Amino acid sequence: MPLLPGRYGDALDTSSIRRLVDKYERLSGVAGVSPHVLRHTTLTELARQKKQDLALVAALAGHSKLATTAIYVQPNMQDLEAAVDSLMED
């Protein structure tokens, strides 16, 4: 079963996905949305916020190497600041 099924249950192709994203970008008024941004945001959410297994996230992304998927769990500035703050609390 495809992640993004079309009208007849088959997978949407790249151009159909692009048209949908463009349509909803216009309707929402949110600039800078692209299929790549949505993919990155979804995978980051699964890996970091939902704490899904990295192997599962890699499989969903179609990555053959976990190292490719590891970018989604790299600490960001907010993570680093929180770590420093936690040191100050102890």
Image (cartoon, rainbow, N blue to C red):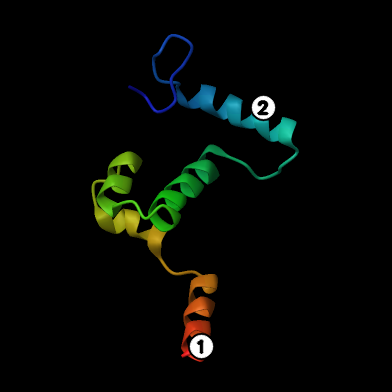
SS at circle 2: helix
Residue 25 left/right relative to 9: right
- Which image quarter: residue 78? bottom right
Disc assigned to residue 23:
2
Residue 25 left/right relative to 63: right
Q: Mark 1 points at which residue?
A: 89
Amino acid marked by disc 1: Glu
Amino acid marked by disc 2: Lys
- Tally the numbered discs: 2
The residue under the point 60% across, 25% down is 19
- Tag 2: Cα neighbours inside 10 Å, few (<14), some, or many (≥20)? few
Disc assigned to residue 6:
none
Q: Which corner quadrant holds the N terminus?
A: top left
The nearer-to-camera label among 2 and 1 is 1
**Percent from the top left, x then y, of residue 51?**
37, 55
- Residue 55 vs 15, above or below: the answer is below
**Percent from the top left, x then y, of residue 63?**
29, 45
- Give the camera-side residue of 14 and 23: 23
- Which image quarter: residue 2? top left
The residue under the point 41% across, 52% down is 50
- Tag 1: Cα neighbours inside 10 Å, few (<14), some, or many (≥20)? few
